[in-house]
Image (cartoon, grey):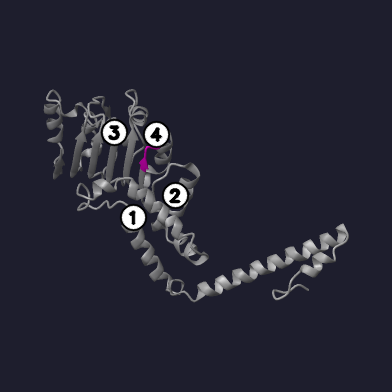
C-alpha cells in the first residue's frame, strides 16, 4: 500500500497491461481523496483554535452588524442631506451587500451565524432576480431598504412591487432612458401603497449635460397616494415633482431636498410649487 512516505514509482514500473494500469490509477485516485480529506481535517483543526471562531455567537453577530452598519447608507435624520451621505449613494450600498455575502462565505460557522440573523440582509441593492429573491428570503418579514444604481427600470419596479409593503427606504439612481420608462407621461401610478416607507431618494443621472432640461415628473399617484410615514424626499438631476407635490403621500414630509437641472426652478412654476409646499405643515427642512 502506498503511504505518504513512500513513492508509487514501483507501481508504475511494473505496469504491463491496461488492466494493471486501471488498478493503479484507481489506487492513486483513492489515495488523492485520502490526502484531500487529511488536508481538510488539518485546516478544520487549525481553524478551530482561531479566537475569531471561538467567540460566542452573540458577540460574532454583533460584530457582523457593526460591519453592516459601516458599509450601508445611513438613513438617520442626522445623516441625510449632510456629507458624506450624498457621496455614499449607491456605491456604499453595493459594497455593503458584497461585504455581508463575503462574510457568510468565510466558513461554515460564520455562514450559519449570518444566515440566522435576518437583519444583516435587509439592505437590498440588486435587481438580479435570483439573488434578490435569495436576499429577500433571508430577511424573513423584516422591513427592508432598497437601492438600485442604473438598473433596468422594469426589473427595479418588478422587485419593488413584490416588497414595497415592507420597504422603509428607497433609493433609485436612474439613467435618462430609465427615467423615461419609469416616469412615462401616460403612467398615472408607480408602485403599490407603501405603508411603512420613510425615505424616498430619486436621482436621474444626466452626466455633464447640465443644459438638459427635460423633466421626468413623479406621478401624483405613486404608491396610490398612500405612504403615510414618508418623511424624507430627495430629488436630483432631471426629475421633478410638480404634480407629485400634491400627492397625499407627502402630508407628513419633514425633509425635502430638490437639486434639479430640470425646469422645476423656472419662475413660471415657482408660485405653484411654493403654494403646494405651503400645504406641507410638518416640513422642517427644505434644501434647494
Q: Can you tell which of label 2 and label 4 is closer to the viewer? A: 4
Residue 74 colored in magenta in the image? no
Q: CA distance from mark 3 to mark 1?
A: 25 Å
Residue 47 rendering spot, x and y as whole percentages: 51, 72
Q: Is residue 122 visible?
A: no
For the residues labelled 2 and 1, the Cα–Cα distance comes to: 19 Å
Residue 213, percent from left and from top: 23, 25
Q: Earlier in the sequence, mark 2 or mark 1?
A: 1
Residue situated in front as seen by the camera: 116 or 203: 203
Q: Are marks 1 and 4 in contact (CB under 8 Å)?
A: no
> The residue tagged with tag 2: helix, strand or loop?
helix
* Label 1 residue SS: helix
Q: Which mark is residue 71?
A: 1
- Measured as percent of width and height from the top left, residue 287 is found at 15, 41
Could you say which disc has been placed on residue 136 in the image?
A: 2
Q: Which residues are magenta?
A: 148-153
One can see residue 191 in this view: yes
Q: Position of residue 218 (x, y in %)?
A: 28, 31
Amino acid at each position: 500500500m502506498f503511504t505518504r512516505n513512500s513513492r508509487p514509482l514501483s507501481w508504475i514500473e511494473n505496469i504491463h497491461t491496461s488492466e494493471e494500469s486501471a488498478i493503479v490509477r484507481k489506487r492513486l485516485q483513492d489515495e488523492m481523496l485520502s490526502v484531500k480529506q487529511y488536508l481538510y481535517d488539518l485546516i478544520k483543526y487549525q481553524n478551530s483554535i482561531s479566537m475569531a471562531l471561538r467567540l460566542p455567537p452573540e458577540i460574532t453577530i454583533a460584530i457582523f452588524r457593526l460591519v453592516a452598519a459601516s458599509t450601508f447608507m445611513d438613513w438617520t435624520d442626522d445623516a441625510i442631506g449632510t456629507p458624506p451621505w450624498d457621496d455614499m449613494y449607491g456605491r456604499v450600498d453595493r459594497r455593503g451587500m458584497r461585504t455581508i455575502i463575503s462574510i457568510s462565505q468565510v466558513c461554515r460557522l460564520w455562514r450559519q451565524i449570518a444566515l440566522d440573523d435576518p437583519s444583516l440582509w435587509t439592505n437590498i441593492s440588486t435587481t438580479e432576480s435570483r439573488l434578490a429573491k435569495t436576499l429577500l428570503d433571508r430577511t424573513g418579514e423584516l422591513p427592508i431598504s432598497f437601492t438600485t444604481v442604473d438598473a433596468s427600470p422594469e426589473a427595479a419596479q418588478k422587485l419593488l412591487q413584490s416588497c414595497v409593503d415592507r420597504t422603509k427606504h428607497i433609493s433609485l439612481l436612474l439613467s435618462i432612458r430609465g427615467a423615461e420608462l419609469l416616469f412615462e407621461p401616460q403612467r398615472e401610478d408607480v408602485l403599490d401603497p407603501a405603508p411603512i416607507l420613510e425615505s424616498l431618494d430619486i436621482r436621474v443621472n444626466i452626466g455633464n449635460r447640465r443644459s438638459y432640461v427635460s423633466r421626468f415628473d413623479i406621478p401624483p399617484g405613486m404608491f396610490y397616494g398612500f405612504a403615510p410615514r414618508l418623511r424624507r424626499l430627495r430629488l436630483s438631476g432631471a426629475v421633478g415633482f410638480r404634480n407629485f407635490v400634491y400627492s397625499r403621500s407627502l402630508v407628513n414630509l419633514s425633509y425635502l431636498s430638490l437639486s434639479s437641472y430640470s425646469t422645476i426652478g423656472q419662475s413660471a412654476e415657482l408660485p405653484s410649487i411654493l403654494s403646494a409646499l405651503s400645504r406641507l405643515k410638518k416640513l422642517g427642512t427644505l434644501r434647494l
